[in-house]
Image: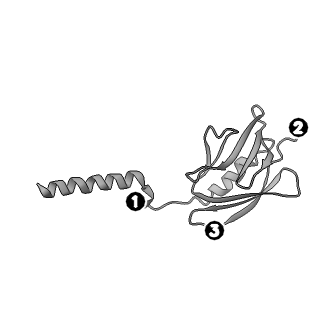
Amino acid sequence: MEGILALVVAAGMFVLATGTARGLMRPMRWDPIAWYQVIQILEQPGRYRVTTVHRHSLELIDAKPTRHALRLGVNHKGVLRLTNENGQGYYPLLRQVTAMDWTVTKTAGVVRLRLKQEGLSWQTTLVDLRGDGGS
């Protein structure tokens, strides 16, 4: 009877461990193309225009289909995502982001992105967010 009880407790602990910390049970996988896909999404011609640059987030205007405000930032789970200006909605762009810094450049609408993903080195690029330039 004690052996069966020990097996039940061990099985319960295993289920709890796999349900709450999947990273312990399977290795994380990185997609080397994901970084380029994020930049490609953000630099769609005439789509996004930067309005405000914060150190860890950006405020954007989405020109298509209607002109509405968006925020680009990392949530508490380490997901780079696009949301509305209130942080509602969810459009994930990149996972396992541990740090991110946006910097203004001399060219209006072009910002420097420095991003670090878990287990990878820092990546830096310029992102063209000039949008269509119209009103």
Residue 121: give its label. Answer: 3
Residue 25: give its label. Answer: 1
Q: Tell me which amino acid carries mark 1.
A: Met
**Colour mapping:** one colour
Tell which circle, 2 or 3, labels the residue nearer the N-terminal end. 3
Crowd tier of the residue under label 3, counting other residues whose Cα lies within 10 Å: few below 14, some 14–19, many 20 or above = few
Distance from disc 2 to disc 1, alpha carbons, whole Å, reads: 50 Å
Crowd tier of the residue under label 1, counting other residues whose Cα lies within 10 Å: few below 14, some 14–19, many 20 or above = few
Instruction: Work out whether 54 lies above or below 27.
Output: above
Please state the horizontal and vertical placement of residue 9, each as a whole percent of the image: 24, 54
Residue 14 location, quadrant: bottom left
Q: Secondary structure at mark 3?
A: loop
Q: Which residue is mark 2?
A: 134
Horizontal side of 96 relative to 103 (left or right) equals: left
Q: Tell me which amino acid carries mark 3.
A: Ser
Q: Residue at image x 20%, y 56%?
A: 7
Q: Tell me which amino acid carries mark 2.
A: Gly
Crowd tier of the residue under label 2, counting other residues whose Cα lies within 10 Å: few below 14, some 14–19, many 20 or above = few
Please state the horizontal and vertical placement of residue 34, each as a whole percent of the image: 62, 55
Q: Residue at image x 88%, y 35%?
A: 135
Horizontal side of 98 relative to 11 (left or right) equals: right
